[in-house]
Amino acid sequence: MTKLSVNINKIATLRNARGGNVPNVVKVALDCETFGAQGITVHPRPDERHIRRADVYELRPLLHTEFNIEGYPAPDFIDLVTKVKPHQVTLVPDSPDQITSNAGWDTKTHASFLAEVLDAFKHAGIRTSVFVAADTEMVEYAARAGADRVELYTEPYASLYPQNPETAIAPFLEAATAARNLGLGLNAGHDLNLQNLNYLYRHIPWIDEVSIGHALVSDALYLGLERTVHAYLDCLR
Ligand code: PXP
């Protein structure tokens, strides 16, 4: 079964636009769970421009499903995650001012840094995932560094999918097969939507979890949150 983890960063962006507590990030997360989402993802950034550290602490005891915290493993982030102890931490190579993650790790160049950080999270009892491009070598070096899972950066798949789904999926199938052969768990995320998700799922049904934010929150403007979560879950069947 492929789990749907809803990334709620955009809900926090909307809330922060007015300084109050509308929409309520915690309520949205709990409602996503009620509507069937099997996980919640947040990306607390150093400038707190969407999810704040306080949100992370507030969410932890209230969530009933899997909590995934993603981010660049700077000392502050490592400190937050090891205190909060989510089910999973996803390491992304973002610089602090980046609008959104736009590349996976070079797991070969950063092998020793990643190994050290992954070890710290492992000691804290937190499952680890490393965000990588659909590149077999990057998957192999993530495994060597000690990752439990890789998350495939699906933006290139999403961009090419409308013109040529078969070409778009090919490198992802290869990288996903490499991950499976190495005994790694497999996540995927970025720019997944109601058009391209089912094709990904049908070709790589062993994906453990997809993490989806931007398109899902945008669809909810038209469909409502409950129908939207159901529509995404339907793509994973
Ligand atoms: N996975 C990672 C590592 C991300 O950084 C993001 C964006 O925050 C996502 C998944 C979700 O991407 P999207 O918002 O395009 O669904």
Image (spheres, grey):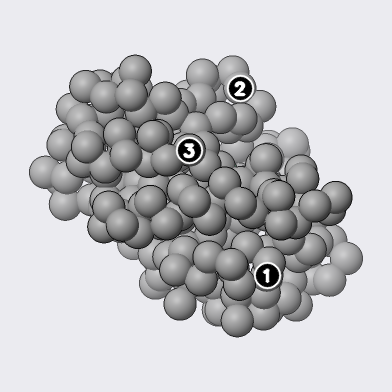
Q: Position of residue 111 (x, y in %)?
A: 27, 24
Q: Position of residue 98 (x, y in %)?
A: 61, 22
Q: Residue at x 11, y 43 (%)?
A: 123
Q: Secondary structure at mark 1?
A: helix
Task: Assess whether mark 2 and mark 1 are in contact (beta carbons under 8 angstroms).
Answer: no
Q: Residue at x 69, y 49 (%)?
A: 168
Which mark, residue 87? Answer: none
Q: Is residue 102 left or right of residue 85?
A: right
Q: CA distance from mark 2 to mark 3?
A: 23 Å
Q: Quadrant of the N terminus?
A: bottom left
Q: Return the residue at label 2.
A: 98
Q: Position of residue 12 (x, y in %)?
A: 63, 45
Q: Amino acid at mark 2?
A: Gln
Q: Is residue 112 left or right of residue 101?
A: left
Q: Position of residue 205 (x, y in %)?
A: 51, 71
Mark 2, residues whose alpha carbon is within 10 Å: few (<14), some, or many (≥20)? few
Residue depth check, mark 1 versus mark 2: number of the one nearer the observer? 1
Sequence order check: which comes first, mark 1 or mark 2? 2
Q: Return the residue at label 3.
A: 135
Q: Can the viewer see residue 177? A: yes
Mark 3, residues whose alpha carbon is within 10 Å: few (<14), some, or many (≥20)? some
Q: Return the residue at label 1.
A: 198
Based on the displayed image, in which of its 4 quarters is residue 141 positioned?
Answer: top left
Q: Amino acid at mark 1?
A: Asn
Sequence order check: which comes first, mark 3 or mark 1? 3
Q: CA distance from mark 3 to mark 1?
A: 22 Å
Residue depth check, mark 2 versus mark 3: number of the one nearer the observer? 3
Task: Assess whether mark 1 and mark 3 are in contact (beta carbons under 8 angstroms).
Answer: no
